[in-house]
Amino acid sequence: MAALRVAPVGLLALIPIALALAACSSPAPVDYSSSYQSAGETVVRMGDLTPTTTVDAQVVSSPKLVVQSSTKGVVGRITRGGAAVVRGDVLATVGELSIRAPVEGIATQAYVKPGQTVPAGLPLLELEYSGFALVGSAPAAFPWPDDLDDTEARGQLEETTGPFDCTSVAAVSSRSEPDPPQPGSRRACLIPKSVPVQLGSNGVYVVTTSTLKGVLLVPVSAVAGRQGAGVVTVVEGDRREAVTVKLGPSDGTDIQIVSGLVAGQRISVIAPNLDTPHT
């Protein structure tokens, strides 16, 4: 996978501390006057966005992964449970497409049978990875592609000095999950076997997917809400109006606006729930 720059965990951990220190050093009350509210504005713009998410995770051993179909079609072949596979082996065929093993492991359970018609994204079989992985809850709204070869990921463990490329990122089987199940979309960054790890240690990984071209963008700070829908403050002269928008993915700095705004509109850079005057 191509390299993806990611800040070390130590640096990420300092961010909330820095914010807290900044808050403590500013005892003066916030000025919610009209002049203050109209100062911070930005324009809705067109641009490119590479969806990015950061996942807090923990090291687990031999995770059970879900191998999904990346297309709609009829299942022609499926690997039976108990078969040992290596990276690149054909695990199943759907239509004319071969679904290959992302890593070496044991195919522990098939979910479908030859002759079934399946949609894209449907789990086909369970694969137990013979190694370690960073497992965590990714945002449910993150746009995971049907073909996970279209993702790139970098991981970082607390006890190591440098990041590494994840061998692959895969959905985690419910059989690998604690009881009760954890919230969000559970995903595993598969750790290369050359990376020394300690079972149970904490880490983080950053995932990106294919870049979206020519989409509407606003700063993340301007939106109240993240999961599919949110609210922004539209500014027209002296008039300010809270407008509901449909949201797409984010790169951590900007977020896609699917509907509710048009290019060129002016909005407050502060989310509505933050710039509303307090009494």
Image (spheres, grey):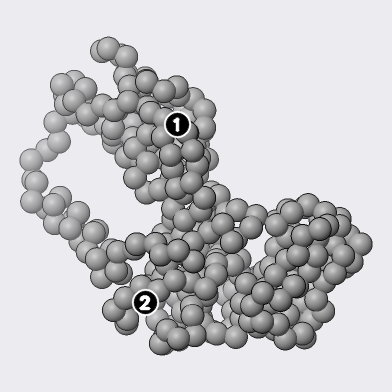
Q: Residue at x 9, y 46 (%)?
A: 26
Read off the residue under disc 2. Answer: 157
Q: Nearer the viewer, residue 165 or 228?
A: 165
Residue 216: which disc?
A: 1
| Residue 208 located left or right of residue 120 | left
Q: Are marks 2 and 1 in contact (CB under 8 Å)?
A: no
Is disc 1 placed on a helix, strand or loop?
strand
In this rendering, is residue 272 above or below 250?
above
Q: Nearer the viewer, residue 96 or 240?
A: 96
Question: What's the distance in space between the residues labelled 2 and 1, CA to CA?
Answer: 35 Å
* First reached walking from the N terminus: tag 2 or tag 1: 2
Report crowding for label 2: few under 14, some 14 to 19, many 20 or more residues within 10 A (C-alpha). many
In this rendering, is residue 231 above or below 17?
above
In this rendering, is residue 134 above or below 35?
below
Can you give x and y, in whole percent of width and height, for residue 248 in the image? Answer: 50, 40
- Looking at the rendered structure, the kind of residue marked 1 is Leu
Residue 73: which disc?
A: none
